[in-house]
Amino acid sequence: MNKKPDSAGLDNAGAGTRAVWGGEQVRHPYNATQTPIVVSAAYGYDDIDVWYDVALGKAPGFIYSRMSNPTVETLEAKISELEMAESAVAFSSGMAAISSVLYTFLAHGDRVVSTKDSYGGTNKIFEEFLPRMGVEVTLCETFDHEAIEREIARGCQVLYLETPTNPTLKILDIQRLVAAAKRVGALVVADNTFATPLNQNPLALGVDVVIHSATKFLSGHGDVLGGLVCGAQALMSKVRHYREINGATLDPFSAYMIIRGMKTLVLRMRQQQRSAHALAEFLCTEPLVASVNYPGLPSHPNHAVACAQMGGFGAIVSFVLIGGMDTVKVLLPRLRFAHCAGNLGAVETIYGPARTTSHVENTLEERLALGISEGLVRVSVGIEDTDDLLDDLKQAFAFVRCLREETSHQPA
């Protein structure tokens, strides 16, 4: 299963061409130019022996859509092209992909090393679910590569990386940590959602398994859930087997929606990154902002690492507001060209504090322990005109400053 369509013509093609044609250099039924949505749960065979060969993977074909589906398979081939992977497996959500990978490769008595900075749902798996399985979890300070290397050297089965991190935009030196992991025979897993395959290809840097929440930039329109896992065929066979039995399969309509979204990924990211950089530079000048997180800024602690391993810096910016949640509650409702919502990667700009977005699953105490203040705001920059986004943010800050000034002059 998961045999990629002929992609010989894409060997030297650029990312934009791969995003459009990856997995689709085949003749579709009825000569359709677009991937069809195949909604059948099962696939019939008149020849019992052929049916049996397909079921065992000895012959191409489909048996049951929990195992494989033509539309989903096209999506898997497309992300394989973009991540330069041998194979890929699609899931019903990003968290289904993350949890399935961890449960596939970890067992009772194993040890996993990761960092404190990771998506809140991932952190919950580390803090709550894996320990129940008897898996030892060690979470290191994200900025301390020496500490991470020391923990890896103690021995582990899996090293889990997320870079840039959500929502603090910290950067991990992938090649450096991969080298440490390989010395102890550990499998390296990387969440590449924020960077996207356009800006970062972890497999080329030595990572074994790459994960995407396809809900985000890959689909790009905030209207579908999905997760994708990429890597070597032998590893993906294990992940696929876990998915077949546990059932977190992506449905064909969602697969089609993600396929459609991925075709404009290059165009969207080009504008989104341009605006993200402009917003980050502006936020650095705003008196109500205590700090700005964006790897494209020379002031970012790991800017040099980001430049070395990324082709672009992404469309996510986060910043910490002076006044904390009180300022957040005044600033965000004033924005005109933005959703306040718990998603990212869409064509519309989206703002939100960590407590209702990336780390809604965590308590206040847990967020503070992870270094996430109540005044931190994450911005997923959309495809709107850059000047409009800047003007919108400026007028919102002007309102907050005016309100603060009026309050400060009121008699006690």
Image (cartoon, helix red, strand yellow):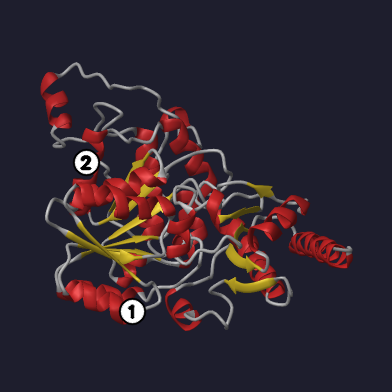
- The residue sitting at 64% across, 74% down in the picture is 290
Quadrant where the N terminus lies? top left
Indicate whether 202 appears above or below 4: below
Front residue of 189/318: it is: 318
Q: Which residue is mark 2?
A: 242
Q: Position of residue 248 (x, y in %)?
A: 32, 36
Q: Which mark is residue 145?
A: 1
- Cα separation, mark 1 vs mark 2, equals 32 Å
At 38% across and 41% down in the image, what residue appears? 74
Q: Nearer the viewer, residue 235 or 103?
A: 103
Residue 167 can be seen in this image: yes
Give the image location of residue 363, x and y in percent.
46, 51
Up-down relation of residue 128 to residue 158 (above or below): above
Label 1 element class: helix
For mark 2, give the secondary structure.
helix
**Around disc 2, counting alpha carbons within 10 Å, would you say few (fewer than 14), some (14 to 19), or many (20 or more)?**
some
Instruction: Give whichever of discs 1 and 2 has the lower sequence position.
Output: 1
What amino acid is found at the position of numbered circle 1 in the picture? His
Give percent across and percent down for residue 402: 86, 64
Judged left or right of residue 399, residue 364 is left
- Residue at position x 15%, y 70% in the image: 155
Quadrant of the image for the C terminus?
bottom right
